[in-house]
Amino acid sequence: MQWIKVVAPGQGAMLAAVARPSGAGPFPTVVLLHGTHGFAREYVQLAEALAHEGLLAVAACWFSRGSGAGVRFVTPIDCLEAPSQREASNPATLEVVDMLVAAARTLPDARRDAIGLFGHSRGGGAALNYVLSRRDVRAAALNSAGYDPSALAELVSQVSTPLLILHGTADSPADGGSAFTNVQMARDFEAALRRIGKPVEAQYYVGSGHNSLFTSSKQFDDEAKRMAAFFLHNLEN
C-alpha cells in the first residue's frame, strides 16, 4: 500500500491509498470514490481486495468531512485538506474527479488506456456524471447510487460506458440512502438502459441496505469479485 496526495488547485489536497497487485505491470486501474459518509478504512480495504484480483486500485478522499446517517457504518480517515463536500453534479466535482483520474494515469504501474471508476452513494453519482460528461474512462461501477427519474431518459441516452449497478433491495434513508436510492430507481435505470441496448450489468442484494457493502463480509467479498471481473473484462479488452 502506497499513500499519495493529489493536489486540486484552489480546492485542496486529496489523500489517496494506492493498492498494487503482485507481479509485473502495467495494470488496469480503478479509482474509488467514497460516499457522503466520507473517506474510510473500508475503502482502503476494498482497494486491497481489488488489487488482490489484479487491478491497481486508488481509494481517494475526494472531499473532507463526511456526514449523514451512513457515518456509523465506516471507520473514518481524516483528510481535512481535501475539497469541500459538493453535490455529485457540481462542475467542481467533475474537476476533482478529473484530477484523480489524471493522477491515476501517471502512476508507474497504471495502464494509461485502461482506467475505470467505482463510486458508492454520492461517489456513485459523481462516477455516473463523470462518465456521461468526460467519457475518458472505460467502465464504471455504481454502488448504492441515486437515480433521478425525472432525468432518466436523458441519462440513458447519454450512456456509452459499460456500467455495473450494485444495489441493496432495502436501501433507504434510515441507513444513509435517499428517495433517489430506492431500489426501484436503480431497477428502472437498468431496464431503461437494456431497452435501448446500452452496456449494463446489475446485481441486487436481497435485504441489503445502503451501506451493506461495509457491514456484510459476504456482500463485500461478492462485490469485490464482481467488480474485479467486470473491470478486468472491460479494461483489458
Image: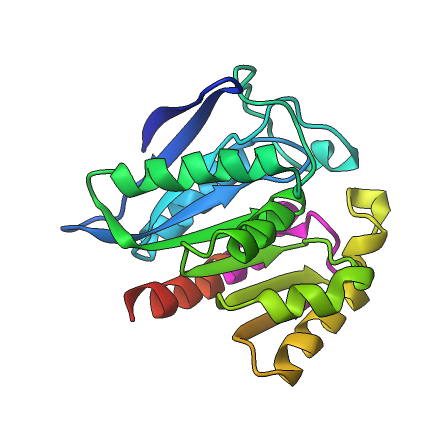
Q: Is 50 on the left or on the right of 165, as rendered?
A: left
Residue at x 21% of width, y 44% of height = 109
Residue 77 vertical position relative to residue 192 in the rendered view, above or below = above
Displayed quadrant of residue 191: bottom right
What residue appears at the point 85 percent right and 44 percent down from the top-left corner?
Answer: 174
**Residue 68 pos. (x, y %):** 77, 32
Instruction: Give the mark count.
Output: 0
Q: Quadrant of residue 103?
A: top left
Would residue 161 appear left or right of 51 to someone viewing this image?
right
Looking at the image, residue 147 lies above or below residue 130: below
Q: Is residue 213 magenta?
A: yes
What residue is shown at x 42% (from left), y 34% (from top)? 99
Q: Nearer the viewer, residue 55 or 100?
A: 100
Query: What coloring was used for the rendering?
Result: rainbow
Q: Nearer the viewer, residue 153 or 211?
A: 153
Magenta-drawn segment: 205-223
Give residue 55's position: percent from left, percent from top. 32, 53
x then y, percent, for residue 178: 82, 48
Image side of residue 131 versus residue 114, left or right: right
Which residue is found at the position 26% from the left and 50% from the top?
Answer: 112
**If the image is split into quadrants, where does the N terminus sit?**
top left
**Magenta stretch encompasses residue 172:** no
Q: In this view of the protein, can residue 171 be seen by the observer?
A: no
Residue 117 visible from this viewpoint: yes
Q: Quadrant of the C terminus?
A: bottom left
In the displayed structure image, the side of residue 185 where residue 74 appears, left or right: left
